[in-house]
Image: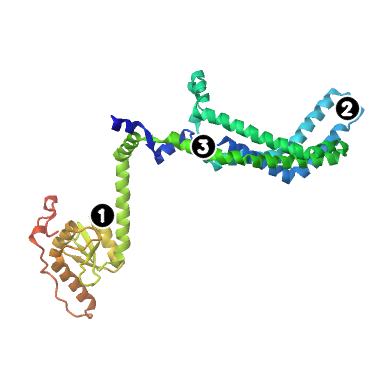
Amino acid sequence: MPEQQSLQERTEQPTERRKKDSRKKGQVPRSKELNTMLSLLFGAFGLVIMGGSMSVEFVSLFESALSFDREVAFDDEMIAVRFVGLVVSSLLILTPFLAVMMVGSIVGPIVMGGWSFSLSAMAFKLEKISPAKGIKRVFSAKGLLELFKALFKFVILAATTVFLFGVLLDQILSLSNQAPEKAFAEATTILRWSLVILSFTMILIVVFDVPFELWNHNRQLKMTRREVQDELKESEGRPEVKSRIRTLQRELSQRRMMEAMPTADVVITNPTHFAVALKYEGVAGKAPLVLAKGCDLIALKIRSVAIENDIAIFEAPPLARALYASTEIGHEIPENLYLAVAKVLAYIYQLRTADRGEYTTPLDDISIPDEYSGIFADEGVSGDE
């Protein structure tokens, strides 16, 4: 019973597959406080950079708005046209600032959780409008934490605002005694630096909120041991996955073989069914290594690479089959084949060192142990092939 219970407890870290599935459903870590802070911060720096020019443009716009002919004041159509023109002009002045604010609202989600678009997250679900579910969310641990964050944010921002009013009160009151142009520029300066201070104040909330949201998201994705086991069985048990893994392993092995082939000393062939590439370092106590081996199409590929790299090809059907069956790639040949391979290597060395026109005795007395004589006989490969 305790073991069964442990299988149902969410104690295991989420797998990569679980994370990908949750991302497809739109379940990614998000921090509303981070988004708010970055939006305010981008807006504040937007005002710092563009506030001066914006204030000048708005002053000019207000002057033109308050200066009009008597005929316009009594013409309903012209008043409407001027009003629309003022709205459009105001939007054009604010467009760069609003664009900066929009960038800030986009950067927040990308920084935390990355960009994610999911139609399933926007799908209508009854549980989203269920009163019972809503009450449960409100009085859950997360709901209480959200309430605490809201109160904490209110206290921080309220205290900062009161502080700013206390410091800037004289400047704010003096605006009424200044010329409109100067008052507007001064008000813009007060606004932008107040916004900068308020946005930096939000960092105190973000420092706590971001780690919590990451932890809570990971907690929600945690899996039971049973879920991990089932996922592992499903992933490894699918025929297409196994086939793909075997194909990749085979391709990687063949690639490594062909990369090592140029260093081979000799390729022993069947000649058409099997091919085995050997390399002998000449180090005492070390036997020749099998660099590559294959049958049929791979054997033809090994022969082709050998020809391209001027590697000796020696036809010895029984020895080729014995080496193919007894030795893995990268391993030394078995002890009972030392003599046969040594004769082949000596013959190849003799051919390489012989002077042109010098007669070299053909090698026709290669014998292998009887235990290899029946290899592949059931596949129709005879000793002479």
Question: In whole angstroms, how far apart are the C-alphas of marks 2 and 3?
Answer: 57 Å
Counting from the top left corner in percent of width and height, residue 179 is at 88, 39
* Residue under the point 14% across and 67% down: 340
Quadrant (top left, top right, bottom left, bottom right) of the C terminus: bottom left
Counting from the top left corner in percent of width and height, residue 332 is at 21, 63
Foreground label between 1 and 3: 3
Q: How is the image coloured?
A: rainbow
The amino acid type found where label 3 is placed reads Glu
Mark 2 secondary-structure assignment: helix
Considering only vertical position in the picture, is 281 above or below 100? below
| Of the pair 279 and 349, the residue shown nearer to us | 279
* Residue under the point 85% across and 41% down: 182
Mark 1 secondary-structure assignment: helix
Total labels: the figure holds: 3
- Asked if the residue under mark 3 is in contact with the one under mark 2, i.e. CB atoms within 8 Å, the reply is no
Foreground label between 2 and 3: 3
Query: Would you say 294 lies left or right of 210 here?
Result: left
Foreground label between 1 and 2: 2
The amino acid type found where label 2 is placed reads Val
Q: Which residue is mark 3?
A: 213
Q: Which residue is mark 2?
A: 72
Counting from the top left corner in percent of width and height, residue 325 is at 17, 56
Residue 297 disc label? 1
Quick one: label 1 or label 3, which is nearer the N terminus?
3
Quadrant (top left, top right, bottom left, bottom right) of the N terminus: top left
Quick one: label 1 or label 2, which is nearer the N terminus?
2
Q: Is residue 54 visible?
A: no
Q: Residue furthest right?
A: 70
Considering only vertical position in the picture, is 143 above or below 377? above
